[in-house]
Amino acid sequence: MPEILIAGIGNRYMGDDGFGPKVIDALMRRDLPDSVELRDVGLCGVTLAPDLADYELVIFVDAVQKGGKPGTIYRSEIKAEQVEGPKPGEVMSSFTFSVHETRLEELLLFAKAIGTLPPATIVIGCEVLEVKLGESLSREVDAAVPRAVELILDELQGYCERK
């Protein structure tokens, strides 16, 4: 059974928002260990939370808007103990059906509340240029796909060496 999930978040029909699924496509062409599951989760939102219990490590790949240069790759790591539990009443108020409506932070809070948050979560984000109707990524974001793949492969190697 896979112990690592790499989840591509985004809408592949909205330009640069399709970054996560495009990285998953690129990873599918690589020879990965059996312990890794690749999944295009689209706009799944908190509906993914119950599935997270099956993994020791989850790597989310998503398009982000932080105000940086388009194509910039960001990496952040979140340990389960760093995620504070939601206050009473917050869990259901944050429940929607899209990560982009919900925010990844709320997905993690919901997973913690229901006891499915994995020990480690890594987020690989790419600064977008534009989110508009179309299946093509901008030149800058498209160029970031192989860089994200290499970063993820490095993460997998480091994880396997620590085990």
Image (cartoon, rainbow, N blue to C red):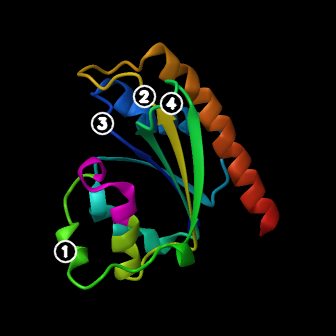
Q: Amino acid at mark 3?
A: Asn
Q: Disc 3 versus disc 4: distance between alpha carbons?
A: 21 Å
Picture layout, residue 146 above or below residue 47: above
Q: What residue did someone put label 2 on?
A: 128
Instruction: Give the magenta-colored segment's residue range.
Output: 99-107
Q: Between disc 2 and disc 1, whose residue precedes?
A: 1
Q: Between disc 3 and disc 2, whose residue precedes?
A: 3
Q: What residue did someone put label 1 on?
A: 92
Q: Disc 4 versus disc 2: distance between alpha carbons?
A: 9 Å
Q: Between disc 3 and disc 4, whose residue precedes?
A: 3
Q: Nearer the viewer, mark 4 or mark 2?
A: 4
Residue 68 is labelled as 4
Residue sitting at the far right: 161
Q: What residue did someone put label 3 on?
A: 11
Do labels 3 and 4 touch, CB within 8 Å? no
Q: Secondary structure at mark 4?
A: loop
The residue depicted at 35 percent of the width and 32 percent of the height is 17
Q: Disc 4 versus disc 1: distance between alpha carbons?
A: 33 Å
Can the viewer see residue 31 in this picture? no
What x and y, as percent, mark residue 79? 58, 70
Location of the C terminus by quadrant is bottom right
Q: Between disc 4 and disc 1, whose residue precedes?
A: 4
The residue depicted at 23 percent of the width and 50 percent of the height is 101
Q: Secondary structure at mark 2?
A: loop
Q: Disc 2 versus disc 1: distance between alpha carbons?
A: 30 Å
In terms of secondary structure, what is the magenta stretch mainly?
Answer: helix
Examine the image and state in which quarter residue 53 appears: bottom left
Question: How many neighbours does mark 2 have within 10 angstroms: few (below 14), some (14-19), or many (20 or more)?
Answer: many
